[in-house]
Amino acid sequence: MTTHTALMNVSPAFTRLSPTWFSIHVESESNADQWIHFCQKQGIKAGLAISPETPISALEPYLPALDFVLVMSVKPGFGGQSFLQDTFHRIETLQHLRVRQSSSFFIQVDGGIQVKEAIQLKKMDVDMIVIGSYLVHHVNPSDVLQQIVNSL
């Protein structure tokens, strides 16, 4: 059974949950075009996640059809990792591709994001930021959010 077949078999269960957004890793899907079309036909915003070691060029064929790209700023698998600084360059590359292709996909970033990175990402006009371990393990999570808001 191919990854594509397995994903398409699981997808109807997700659609019954009525998700608004749904992403998969570009590395896990050999035929993302069909998956993107399936999601959008169901009224679900389709996204592709990309791991740090995968070149941004792997996304290029799909960008015009995507609603969002999830840029992983750590290696997927476990929380608490440090933010990979090359992520900023990868985001700039995506932003240039978005303009060059006249695309409108959102850019989301997840992994190792602390206050300093969140501020920089917002200054770069990233559309969505995911803060997990740092926020939930902080003594006062509302202070973290306030620091980010106050810096903008």
Image (cartoon, rainbow, N blue to C red):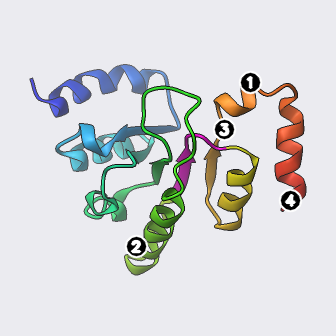
Residue type at tag 4 = Ser
Q: CA distance from mark 3 to mark 4?
A: 16 Å
Q: Going by the image, does 53 lie left or right of 29? A: right
Instruction: Identify the residue at horizontal 43%, vertical 21% (top origin).
Output: 16
Residue type at tag 1 = His
Q: Going by the image, does 142 lie left or right of 54? A: right
Q: Secondary structure at mark 3?
A: loop
Q: Residues within 10 Å of mark 1 (few under 14, many from 20)?
A: few
Location of the N terminus by quadrant is top left
Residue type at tag 3 = Ile
Asked if the stretch drawn in magenta spans residue 112, the answer is yes
Q: CA distance from mark 2 to mark 1?
A: 35 Å
In front of the other: label 2 or label 4? 4
Q: Which residue is mark 1?
A: 137
The percent position of residue 53, horizontal first and vertical second, equals 33, 49
Q: Which residue is mark 3?
A: 131
Q: Secondary structure at mark 4?
A: helix
Relative to 80, say whether 37 is above or below.
below
Residue type at tag 2 = Leu
